[in-house]
């Protein structure tokens, strides 16, 4: 085949997919991005996360939001689904990890990472509008006082974030013409410090991907097909290695009964559907025979950033801990352990259901008994305050959440199996040695902090009820390596055993970063795109009419 519908078809529109779409469009390629999530705007974003049908993602239950919660045997994972991927719901914290991460994992030695990556980080920062938090608020002041109590106040910092703060002399919420891309980007409004970043910014201040990479990509002709799920990717023309391109089949993401699929052809395909999404699709394609030569290393060494989520609640406090930006500050309580102060906006109290009384003890089923003892002690010593600390009412105003991350290595493996409770189809299932259910150092810090400031310490409910930690940063599963025996892609993100096939998302991360991974995924995507040359001949067909033609052909 010499004619393709697209030069590049990208599955997913998160950080890897958005960077790829923009850079490929700049190089003159015709690009289609297929995204199963919805396109969001200030007009349709939920006012609070109690509006679960627009906040949570579970199409089977008619929940068409952007936050997915998935429970595995080893971990509970939170991740995003939207045009713009997780950037719609993430806390826009954009930090560079320590250099030591490049010396660990499969990617060690594949490049001179410590020399190469700084320039890509700088470009990622420029594109994402990274700046230091300019609106620290009550939760950040509280974290500083807790750090001082623990003797680690020297490690306290205000986060680097992707938020537009505007000029200091102007009122919050002031609108400005594009401040980032010499007028090529959208108009923006300055942050009002409402704390609503993780429920979707309704005030046009958050630098989500639809305000930078994706916005600019669409201006250059990239087409985005939302609410659409890819179900097959198959080599064309009898070339099993994909050297003659691919046929991609997709369906409506929200239909709950079998529906007609529609098809596209592309010379190149990029998987950028997040760690879980890419692993799921590749396992499916490998098993059904569409891409049978995907490395057997698929699903190995999935990491969770060694995370734990804790909190301290202050029932009845006069301070409003919901104000500020979602993650405004952080500290290091030891060389490996990093804690950030997290908040939700006033009224968005849904996530209170993920917390219970702070519980120590041993991991395993016996921890339920430690929890029961902790609950009895709490209600006996502070009956009214204890009950209030467990109720949703005023949760966001009264609570500072601790997102704890470690650089200590640890991983699980994902497999494609039938689950015991739903044997009718295969899905991702976790295997391997249990990862730490909780981080004792973080629990100790939370307990001391609560006692010192008159608060109530809280643990994640998943730690108690299911004996698993909770993470918002699932990474790995499609390791970068020097051979298909130990990885899925090579050092240039090319899938082993295939041509014109790439993986560019969080699944390629080969170490626990100890910080939020979004900036690193962006920087690695920039690096991947640097290896792809400009297209010599650019198609002149109008991209929008081209997509309409395909819609007519496919009947959707």
Image (cartoon, grey):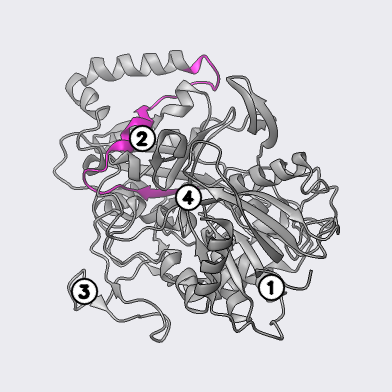
Judge left or right: residue 326 versus residue 120. left
Judge left or right: residue 480 versus residue 228. right
Say which residue appears at 76% left-offset and 62% top-offset.
494
Residue 273 in the image: above or below residue 7 = above
Say which residue appears at 69% left-offset and 65% top-offset.
266
**Residue at image mark 1:** 115
Q: Nearer the viewer, mark 1 or mark 3?
A: 3
- Distance, label 1 to label 4, CA atoms, is 33 Å
Q: Nearer the viewer, mark 3 or mark 2?
A: 3
Q: Which mark is residue 81?
A: 4
Q: Quadrant of residue 489?
A: bottom right
Residue 305 in the image: above or below residue 83 = above
**Residue at image mark 3:** 174
Residue 423 x %, y % = 63, 22
Q: Which of marks 2 and 1 is nearer the N terminus?
A: 1
**Residue at image mark 2:** 448
Q: Quadrant of residue 72?
A: top right
User: Which type of secondary structure does the marked residue at label 4 adopt?
Assistant: loop
Q: Earlier in the sequence, mark 1 or mark 4?
A: 4
- Distance, label 2 to label 1, CA atoms, is 41 Å
User: Which type of secondary structure does the marked residue at label 1 adopt?
Assistant: helix
- Distance, label 4 to label 2, CA atoms, is 37 Å
The span shown in magenta is 338-367
């Amino acid at each position: 085949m010499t004619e393709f519908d697209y030069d590049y078809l990208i599955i997913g529109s998160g950080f890897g997919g958005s960077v790829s779409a923009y850079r490929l469009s700049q190089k003159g390629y015709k690009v289609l991005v297929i995204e199963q999530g919805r396109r969001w705007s200030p007009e349709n974003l939920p006012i609070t996360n109690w509006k679960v049908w627009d906040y949570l993602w579970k199409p089977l239950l008619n929940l068409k939001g952007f936050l997915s919660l998935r429970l595995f045997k080893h971990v509970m994972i939170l991740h995003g689904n939207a045009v713009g991927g997780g950037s719609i719901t993430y806390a826009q914290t954009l930090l560079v990890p320590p250099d030591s991460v490049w010396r660990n994992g499969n990617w060690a030695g594949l490049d001179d990472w410590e020399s190469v990556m700084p320039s890509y980080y700088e470009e990622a920062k420029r594109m994402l509008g990274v700046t230091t938090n300019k609106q620290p608020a009550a939760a950040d002041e509280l974290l500083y006082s807790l750090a001082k109590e623990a003797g680690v106040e020297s490690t306290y910092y205000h986060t680097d974030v992707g938020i537009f703060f505007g000029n200091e002399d102007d009122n919050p919420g002031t609108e400005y013409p594009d401040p980032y891309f010499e007028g090529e980007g959208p108009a923006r409004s300055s942050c009002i410090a409402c704390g609503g970043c993780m429920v979707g910014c309704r005030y046009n201040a958050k630098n989500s991907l639809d305000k930078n990479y994706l916005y600019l990509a669409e201006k250059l002709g990239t087409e985005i097909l939302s609410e659409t799920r890819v179900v097959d990717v198959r080599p064309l023309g009898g070339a099993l290695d994909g050297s003659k391109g691919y046929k991609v089949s997709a369906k409506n993401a929200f239909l709950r009964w079998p529906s007609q699929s529609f098809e596209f052809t592309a010379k190149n395909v990029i998987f950028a559907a997040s760690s879980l999404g890419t692993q799921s699709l590749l396992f499916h394609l490998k098993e059904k025979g569409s891409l049978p030569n995907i490395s057997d290393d698929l699903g190995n060494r999935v990491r969770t950033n060694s995370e734990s989520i804790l909190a301290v609640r202050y029932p009845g406090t006069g301070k409003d801990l919901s104000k500020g930006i979602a993650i405004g500050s952080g500290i290091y309580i030891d060389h490996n352990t990093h804690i950030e102060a997290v908040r939700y906006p006033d009224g968005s109290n849904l996530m209170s259901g993920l917390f219970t009384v702070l519980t120590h003890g041993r991991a395993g089923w016996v921890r339920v008994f430690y929890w029961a003892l902790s609950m009895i002690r709490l209600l006996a010593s502070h009956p009214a305050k204890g009950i209030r600390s467990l109720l949703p009412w005023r949760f966001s105003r009264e609570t500072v959440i601790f997102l704890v991350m470690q650089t200590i290595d640890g991983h699980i493996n994902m497999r494609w199996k039938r689950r015991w409770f739903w044997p009718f189809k295969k899905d991702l299932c976790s295997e391997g040695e249990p990862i730490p259910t909780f981080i004792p150092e973080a629990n100790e810090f939370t307990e001391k902090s609560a006692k010192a400031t008159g608060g109530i310490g809280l643990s994640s409910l998943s730690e108690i009820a299911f004996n698993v930690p909770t993470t918002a940063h699932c990474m790995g599963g499609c390791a970068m390596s020097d051979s298909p025996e130990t990885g899925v892609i090579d050092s240039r993100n090319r899938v082993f055993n295939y041509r014109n096939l790439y993986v560019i998302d969080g699944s390629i991360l080969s170490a626990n970063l100890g910080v939020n991974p979004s900036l690193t995924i962006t920087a690695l995507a920039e690096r991947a795109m640097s290896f792809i040359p400009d297209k010599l001949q650019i198609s002149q067909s109008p991209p929008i009419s081209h997509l309409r033609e395909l819609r007519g052909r496919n009947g959707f």
